[in-house]
Image (cartoon, rainbow, N blue to C red):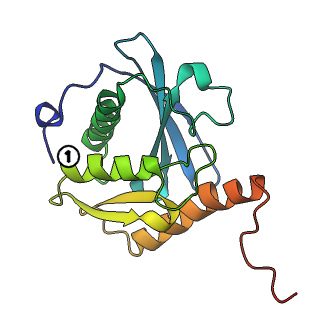
Amino acid sequence: MPSERELGEGYPFHYRKGPSQKDGPLVCTHYYTFRTRKNRRYVVEAEQYQHHVYVLKYYPLALKASPNRFKLLVNDGDAFRILTTCTQIFLNICRRDVLASAGFVGEALVGEGSVSTKRFRVYLKMVTAFIGPMRFVHHPLPAISAYFLECRANHEPGLLATVEQMFRDLYIVPEAMENGKPTAPDGPA
């Protein structure tokens, strides 16, 4: 795993643990905040699921109330440093949880299709460039614009299949239902 110095300069961040969940696959949401050089505040939500799986999501605080907060681009010209900060947050999680695996879904921009989205392609380049294969098995899932970094020390059987289904259940299927798209063919007409 690269050191933070090799990764590049990110922003200093602050951490706050959210309440623990008793039922369902979600264990807890961890919140990280940071400010960019243009004084824009960002929130990173690291949703911790069963089996030491963390799904990282981030957005500008100004868009918190927007249902499209994960779909919009701010275009500050600061994407690399923001993504570097998100990667440093994941490395921070790995220091606290040695079995941590990470996942993310590259949300489609408004009007963009959901297969191999622009965000997914950017995240793919970032992750493959800065997180090596020594500690994690890389699983790009372009059909659902998701990526899973499976911790080699986590010997949970069938973890990839579990996580891929979780991505579909929590992120892909609800999105399709919200947009009125069928999730399966209706059958013969």
Quarter of the image for the C terminus: give it.
bottom right
Q: What residue is rendered at 68% in x and 26% in y?
A: 65
Kind of element beneath mark 1:
helix
User: For residue 175, what is the image quadrant?
Assistant: bottom right
Task: Write down the residue under mark 1.
Answer: 130
Q: What residue is rendered at 76% in x and 52% in y?
A: 178
- Check the image and name the residue furthest to the right: 189
User: For residue 15, what is the image quadrant?
Assistant: top left
Badge 1, how many Cα within 10 Å: few under 14, some, many 20+? some
- Check the image and name the residue furthest to the top: 39
Residue type at tag 1: Phe
Residue 5 in the figure: left or right of residue 126: left
Residue 6 in the figure: left or right of residue 147: left
Q: What residue is rendered at 60% in x and 33% in y?
A: 69
Above or below, 171 relative to 13: below
Q: Which x, y percent locates residue 104?
A: 44, 50
Q: Which x, y percent locates residue 66?
A: 67, 29
Q: What residue is rendered at 48% in x and 50% in y?
A: 106
Q: Which x, y percent locates residue 33?
A: 44, 22
- Check the image and name the residue furthest to the bottom: 188
Above or below, 150 relative to 122: below
The residue nearer to you, when weighing 77 against 4, is 77
Q: Is residue 72 visible?
A: yes
Q: Is residue 101 visible?
A: no
Residue 20 in the figure: left or right of residue 141: right
Q: Which x, y percent locates residue 157?
A: 38, 75
Numbered circles on residues, count = 1
Above or below, 61 relative to 111: above
User: For residue 151, what is the image quadrant?
Assistant: bottom left
The residue nearer to you, when weighing 140 against 72, is 72
The residue nearer to you, when weighing 21 against 141, is 141
